Amino acid sequence: MLTQLLFCPLAIAIGAAFQANIHPRSEPMQPNRLGEHLLDVRTIASLIAGAFWVYCMKGLRWLGVSLVILQEAVIWGAFLAAGMSVSGDGL
């Protein structure tokens, strides 16, 4: 269940490695397309992993759903920060 939290450092690593091109400053920022695609894949993988953990917790699915929702909130915060770095928005 806690393996779901491994998506946080992965999202931050993608944001750090695939930053938007911000030079020269006179031109609009160019988002990094590979970084955007990697974040999209990680988002879908995170949702699939969450659904898997809820499915595996037969009898305690209410607990599984509540834990996955809390973990997804943390993970989506990391995806938000990485997405701003990759797209160049908010910089």
Image (cartoon, grey):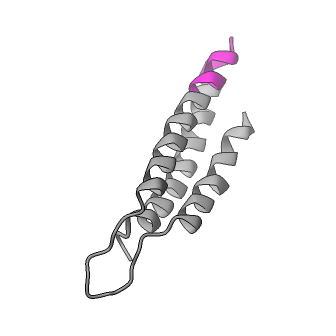
Tell me the residue at 32%/74% (across/down): 29
On the image, the x and y values in percent for residue 31 come to 37, 64
Tell me the residue at 32%/87% (across/down): 25
- Name the quarter where the N terminus is drawn: top right
In the image as oriented, which residue stretches furthest toward the right? 2
For residue 13, what is the image quadrant? bottom right
On the image, the x and y values in percent for residue 79 come to 50, 54
Was residue 54 drawn as part of the magenta stretch in this picture? yes
Q: Which residues are magenta?
A: 51-62
Was residue 81 drawn as part of the magenta stretch in this picture? no
- Left or right, residue 73 beside residue 84: right
- Left or right, residue 61 beside residue 85: right
Is residue 46 depicted above or below 20 in this figure?
Answer: above
In the image as oriented, which residue stretches furthest toward the top? 59
Tell me the residue at 59%/34% (across/down): 68
Tell me the residue at 46%/44% (across/down): 40
Is residue 70 depicted above or below 23 in this figure?
Answer: above
